[in-house]
Image (cartoon, rainbow, N blue to C red):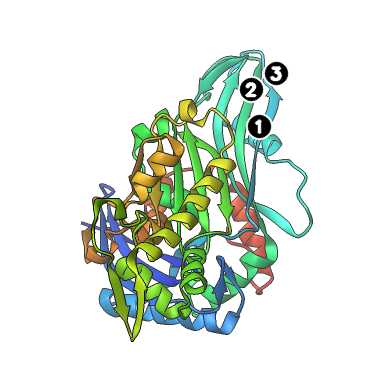
Amino acid sequence: MKRTKIAAIDVGTTKVCTVMADIDRSGGLRIVGVGVVPSSGLQKGLVVNVNEAKESIRESVRVAERVAGYRLESAYVGVTGRHITSVNNRGVVAITRNDMLVRPDDLRRVFQVARNIKVPSDQKLLHVIPRNYIIDGQQGVKNPVGMHGFRLDLEAHIIIAAIASVQNLTKCIRGVGVEIEDLVLEPLASAEAVLTGEEKEKGVVLADIGGGTTDIAVFKDNTIYHTAVLPVAGYQITRDISIGLGLSFELAEEMKRKYGNVNPANKDKGEPERTLTTNGHSISYSDLSEVIRVRVEELLSLVVLELPRTDYAKFALSGLVLTGGTANLPGIAELGSELTRLPVRVGVPINLYGVSDNLLDPAYATSVGLLLWKRRNQGAKSWQTKGGLRRFLSQIFRLFGRKSIE
């Protein structure tokens, strides 16, 4: 059976993950190569040292290629960072033909109107995602082609990114000999890996808590409603441990990974105080847990403040899904439920085949999601799912001597 080769590169603050896979004609995804290495040259999702970032990417690609047994030529790449902003916008066009029949050209026209917003000169549209069509006031139309009406409205979710930030990331990827198939906002990718269709339909909040950023995506009625990126994540937890307990940053990270728990030891039960010792340093387990809990509480509070509606409990009936490496902290789901009064679970990529054992972890939601994003959108029309993105890439690539991606 013929299989299509695809790949994804997630360039994170703490790690670079390259995943190579193939898709058969039935849509089955099989992982054939994985390369995970510590990242350098990135801070809060942004490239701060091109050469260091490029070498981390190069090593990650090399490891994945060695496992897969063939060269990686192009990949889907995740984008995040505090430069990301989003807005919902509406476009309206009239259907003036005598038969009042909506045709594909009308969808193209209303799409162009919806994406026509004022954007600063240093920023460009990354995604323009159709959310909902309305015909003569009739809400909830998913595909208006073939329907009759006089007025066609489109509600679209528009994601905007800084040109310079994406340009730096693009330079690093292409600098190791890998072409970019598409740039995908990371929480959109993570959602593909860990959310169910039912959750997206009822309403759900995704918080991908990585090393440098917390990426948020809110879904309702099976479409994207809101996206945001917070510059607070696992790094801040480690820094608090380092400062609060007098440890080096590296040792604080090791303690967090080995013993981290958001629930401090319950001294009221008469349990003896537990002491943790590593590399000659001793700290109290309850002190470590308390520092982590305080920072996680603050982080989850920021997630709630970012939600677009105050009645989020009624809006997001499926609750909150936590993913990303920091979601591995024991007790984080229970704490999230306690603070938000929402159902909370930890999202892990599922239904993976091949050499995918290492990917069954919240830390790799974005990496797997990039592949699933490709699979879901491979048959879609580019103007509908990636119109703004393709124009964005065309401008970026022209800066490097390539005229177009068409």
Q: Nearer the viewer, residue 269 or 18?
A: 269
Which residue is rendered at x = 31% and y = 67% of the image?
259
Is 17 situated left or right of 21 in this image?
right
Instruction: Tell me, yes or no, if residue 7 can be seen here.
Output: no
- Up the image or down, 151 lies above or below 297; here it is above
Q: Mark 1 = which residue?
A: 110
Is 304 situated left or right of 160 in this image?
left
Looking at the rendered structure, the secondary structure element under dot 2 is strand
Which residue is rendered at x = 51% and y = 22% of the image?
141
Q: Are marks 2 and 1 in contact (CB under 8 Å)?
A: yes
Along the polypeptide, which appears first: circle 2 or circle 1? 1
Q: Nearer the viewer, residue 307 or 391?
A: 307
Q: Nearer the viewer, mark 1 or mark 3?
A: 1
Which residue is rendered at x = 25% and y = 47% of the image?
26
Q: Nearer the viewer, residue 206 or 275?
A: 275
Q: Are marks 2 and 3 in contact (CB under 8 Å)?
A: no
* Residue 160, horizontal then vertical, whole percent: 65, 51
Is 131 situated left or right of 258 in this image?
right
The image's mark for residue 298 is none
Q: Amino acid at mark 2?
A: Leu
Is 131 situated left or right of 90 in this image?
left
For label 1, count other residues whose C-alpha is less than 10 Å away and answer few (under 14), some (14-19) or many (20+). many
Along the polypeptide, which appears first: circle 2 or circle 3? 3
Measure how far apart labels 2 and 3 are at the Cα level.
11 Å
* Residue 325, horizontal then vertical, whole percent: 38, 61
Measure how far apart labels 1 and 3 are at the Cα level.
13 Å
- Up the image or down, 132 lies above or below 239; here it is above
Q: Nearer the viewer, mark 2 or mark 3?
A: 2
The image's mark for residue 152 is 2
